[in-house]
Image (cartoon, rainbow, N blue to C red):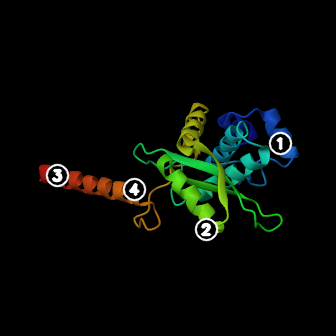
Amino acid sequence: MFKRTPLTAIAGMPATRFDQDQRRGKLPRLDGTGKRTYTMRDAFRLRCYWQAADATDLDSAKLLSDRALEALRPLDPFTWTDGVELHVALIRYDWPDALEGWDCRHVIAGRWEDLRALAKAHVASVDPSARLVSVIAFSATAIANHVWRAARELGLSETESVPGIPEDLTGFPEWFREAEVERRTLAATWSDASDEGRA
């Protein structure tokens, strides 16, 4: 846990801009406690927001950063993925029959090669008449790496551990399950070979 000044430093966002956007109600949802202490996931959300703000309007940047971690689940941007890069993306779509006030935006996440199919699948699930308009994507892995390195430089990297991978891989993407099962098999084989060598 850390305060606002390290939070903005880790996210690479000027503190003055943080204060300004906070007053305007544009900042992403942060899990900071009543004492205004923040987590690495808050830093991830803020970095995501700050990057997205360069490519889209602030409301859309806020939406993307608010929903990024949820869209990635059960994966986590800080989890080791053996070099596979994770992305989060904001999609916009046109729906002529949308109810008044309907927000034709949605956040998706996955590997780069999965984003197109995920975007099309979501739009198709809304209504056959809906049409995909745009996809703005950012590397969640690069954002997490930036945040982790910046925290480490400030001596804060040990404040939170990288989340572990559960034994039960139900709900994880197929590509991740396959790689994780292979890794676990290799680790078990290595461990058995080591045990035999000691016998």
Element type where label 4 sits in the image: helix
Element type where label 3 sits in the image: helix
Q: Where is residue 45 in the image (x, y as percent from the top left)?
A: 67, 47
Nearest the camera: 10 or 1? 10
Q: Distance between the residues labelled 2 and 4?
A: 23 Å
- Confirm whether residue 76 shows in the render: no
Residue position marked by numbered label 3 in the rendering: 193
Tell me which numbered mark, 3 or 4, is placed earlier along the sequence.
Answer: 4
Tell me which numbered mark, 1 or 2, is placed earlier along the sequence.
Answer: 1
Q: Residue 63 carries which label?
A: none
Residue position marked by numbered label 4 in the rendering: 175
Q: Which amino acid does label 3 sit on?
A: Ala
Q: How far apart are marks 3 and 1 (CA)?
A: 56 Å
Residue position marked by numbered label 1 in the rendering: 21
Element type where label 1 sits in the image: helix
Nearest the camera: 176 or 128? 128
Q: Residue placed at 78% from the left, 44% from the top? A: 58
Mark whose residue sits in front, 1 or 4: 4
Q: Which amino acid does label 1 sit on?
A: Asp
Q: Distance between the residues labelled 1 and 4?
A: 38 Å
Nearest the camera: 45 or 157? 45
